[in-house]
Amino acid sequence: VAVVTGSGRGIGKAMAIELAKRGAKVAVNYANAVEGAEQVVKEIKALGNGSDAHAFKANVGNVEESEKLMDDVVKHFGKLDICCSNSGVVSFGHFKDVTPEEFDRVFTINTRGQFFVAKAAYKRMEIGGRIILMGSITGQAKGVPKHAVYSGSKGAIETFTRCMAIDAGEKKVTVNCVAPGGIKTDMYHAVCREYIPNGDQLSDDQVDEYACTWSPHNRVGQPIDIARVVCFLASQDGDWVNGKVIG
């Protein structure tokens, strides 16, 4: 049984569906995108491979809602084996212009939210479970202009991963982090422009051409690329990978 936060769209959606294709029962979490979450559930149920899915509404920026989410998942499916903490928000702006409200908005979801999602899941998790957190290449790469708040919110996740992995050893639970670069989701073109000099002057095709140069494969990353790594970490094959950041 896997719970994937923010799985009504984008990378989270790909994670949920790919886990289900490999036989997992999936708790599809959403905060607002109920239609997207219900569509993911529908797609999983249509697989016909013995997997199952159910949509659960919860704002993971709220600790009480995260706790209730995990309780509801265990109540519905009977147990919890895998937690994929995917929910996140993006932010750009020169640090001199960042308001306390914007700082708190980003860290509440990206950092505090992930910490307490992991905590809530771990308390209810089976022996030998998996916690997979969501970092970002911006949390480990060279500095990105006007990206201090977001990058910092993701950089903290890498430290969480290393420390939680040690603590979670008592239950044989592994804790790892995936740290994607540019991934072609529904928000991709708008966000990707922020990373490219004069990106606001480029067409969508030109953005793609530029972004392709970031990869030795000369292509843009897709949600399925991240989902497959997550599935490896969640599987028995990933049992000896622990406290690591893959990105």
Image (cartoon, helix red, strand yellow):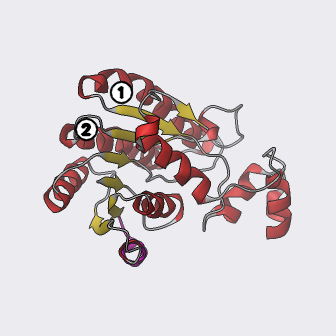
Question: Pointers 1 and 2 in contact (CB under 8 A)?
Answer: yes
Pointer 1 residue? 164
| Residue 58 falls inside the magenta stretch | no
Q: Who is closer to the viewer here, 197 or 4? A: 4
Going 25% across and 38% down the picture, which residue do you hit?
A: 122
In the picture, the disc for residue 41 is none
Percent coordinates x, y for residue 203 in the rendering: 83, 69
Marks 1/2: CA distance? Answer: 10 Å
Q: Which mark is residue 122?
A: 2
Give the overall secondary structure of the magenta segment. helix
Amino acid type assigned to the residue bearing label 2 in the image: Tyr
**Comes first in the chain, label 1 or label 2:** 2
Region of the chain picked out in magenta, as a range: 31-43
Q: Position of residue 64 (x, y in %)?
A: 20, 50
Q: Quadrant of residue 131?
A: top left
The correct choice, above or below, for 190 with respect to 195 in the image is below
Q: Quadrant of residue 112?
A: top left
- The residue positioned 32% from the left and 54% from the top of the image is 3
Residue 188, placed above or below residue 95:
below
